[in-house]
Amino acid sequence: MAADPPRQGLSPALRRTLAQKGPPVLAYVSCDPATLARDSGELLAGGYRLASLTGYDFYPQTAHIESLAVFKR
């Protein structure tokens, strides 16, 4: 499953649902490292582990970075 939430990240209800009974593999695309960190905390507490994390600089000479985090159960 893939998630590409808006800048504010996953909703609290979706974070809880994914942490409790999400898929075996979750690819999470994020444009905000702070919300990725917040959402990752709940996913990790729910039994996921971070399999990989990659940053992408699609917008050179700006402070924006895209991230792809892959979580596995």
Image (spheres, grey):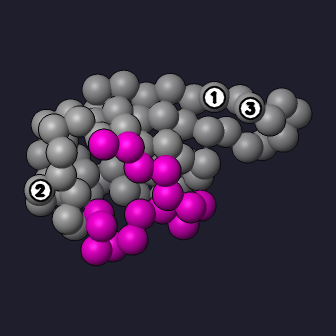
Q: Earlier in the sequence, mark 1 or mark 2?
A: 2
Instruction: Assign the magenta stretch its main secondary structure.
Output: loop
State the extent of the magenta-drawn residues as a range: 1-15
Q: Is residue 45 visible?
A: no
Q: Are marks 3 and 1 in contact (CB under 8 Å)?
A: yes
Q: Is residue 72 visible?
A: yes
Q: Position of residue 54 (x, y in %)?
A: 50, 26
Q: Earlier in the sequence, mark 3 or mark 2?
A: 2
Left or right, 49 with reference to 54: left
Q: For the point 36% across and 25% down, which residue is it? A: 52
Q: Residue furthest bottom?
A: 13
Q: Which residue is mark 1?
A: 56
Q: Quadrant of the C terminus?
A: top left
Q: CA distance from mark 3 to mark 1?
A: 6 Å
- What is the three-letter code of the residue carrying label 1? Tyr
Q: Position of residue 15 (x, y in %)?
A: 29, 63
Q: Is residue 62 above or below residue 18?
A: above
